[in-house]
Image (cartoon, rainbow, N blue to C red):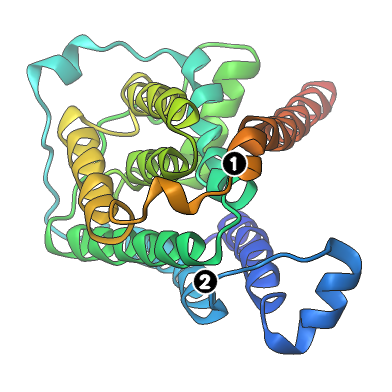
Amino acid sequence: MQLLEISVVAVASLGTIIIAVGQLPAFASLRAKWLGRQHYAHPIPTLLFAALVPVYFVINANTPGRTVFVPELALDRAVPLEPVWILVYVSMWVFAFLPVFVVRKVELRRRAVLAYLTVQLVSYVGFLVYPTVALRPARVIDEGFFAWSLQFIYDFDRPYNCLPSLHVAYAFLAALTCYRVHRGLGIAALLYAALIGISTLYTKQHYVVDVVAGVLLAYVAYLVFLRSYAHDAIIEADRRRAALRVLAAVEVFGVVVVVFWIAYNLRAAA
């Protein structure tokens, strides 16, 4: 893997690992002192999920040289490349962690982690069994912030590991998890997850088949791990505050956009 890939994966994994380690009993008193009384899922599945994040890039890096497939449909060819959709596309990096902000019940957290882990593992098997390649341009011809950001993603993420779309699966699983907490919020999140799915087509990161497979995978994981969790198990206070907690995720994404904007302007000035 390139140094850039290793650095970004390390930062992403570190954040998840820190959250998981903080769930260990040994940190209970310290957590209570600084964060108040919070309940978390068992840390082992979360640590496993974080440890397996780099596997995506290992599979990606070892796909060149293999026979790859192109599940392109006529609809894929009809969708043009639109760099402006990159903002919606990268928002998944924060949107996928929406349950971290919204979910407070330990049992629902545990089920959500298991659902995410299942989606991750099934996707990896799919990448290995049916390797695919995205038909995207090597260079984004347009100028400006959106084009630069899309090119950054192209340089960072090789055009493999398309089917199923993990991007879409994580987005819909996050929305479905929130649906167990607050139905109105869940419906709004599902609508936004659909936009993320559309963004993968306009950025030429995925095909229509990939998007459909990602949605189905998320829904199956929801049926297995989350659907049986009763809405009544959520206390009314958590339900009322769910929408406000989403604002924290919006703020985090705002920071991500600012970082991209600063990097873009520094490069332009160089």
Q: Residue visible at 36% across and 18% down?
A: 202
The residue at which mark 2 appears reads as 46
Is any atom of residue 164 visible in this view? no
Lower position in the chain sequence, tag 1 or tag 2: 2
Residue 67 position by quadrant: bottom left
Residue 56 position by quadrant: bottom left
Q: Where residue 128 sits in the image (x, y, percent)?
A: 20, 64
Q: Where residue 243 sits in the image (x, y, percent)?
A: 62, 30
How many other residues sit within 10 Å of disc 1, few (<14), some (14-19) or many (≥20)?
Answer: few
How many other residues sit within 10 Å of disc 2, few (<14), some (14-19) or many (≥20)?
Answer: many
The reply, left or right, for residue 78 in relation to residue 243 is left
Q: Secondary structure at mark 2?
A: helix
Q: Residue visible at 62% across and 58% down?
A: 12
Is any atom of residue 20 visible in this view? yes
The residue at which mark 1 appears reads as 236
- Asked whether the residues under the numbered discs 1 and 2 touch, taking CB atoms below 8 Å apart as contact, a structural biologist would say no
72 versus 19 height, above or below: above
216 versus 29 height, above or below: above
Mark in front: 1 vs 2: 1
Question: Foreground: 191 or 10?
Answer: 191
Q: Secondary structure at mark 1?
A: helix
Q: Amino acid at mark 2?
A: Thr
Q: Where residue 184 sits in the image (x, y, percent)?
A: 46, 25
Q: Where residue 254 sits in the image (x, y, percent)?
A: 73, 28
Q: Amino acid at mark 1?
A: Glu
Q: Which residue reaches farthest bottom? A: 26
Question: Foreground: 35 or 86?
Answer: 35
Query: Which numbered circle lies on residue 170?
Result: none
Q: Quadrant of the C terminus?
A: top right
Q: Residue visible at 70% across and 87% down?
A: 25
43 versus 144 height, above or below: below
* Mark 1–mark 2 distance (CA, rounded to whole Å): 27 Å
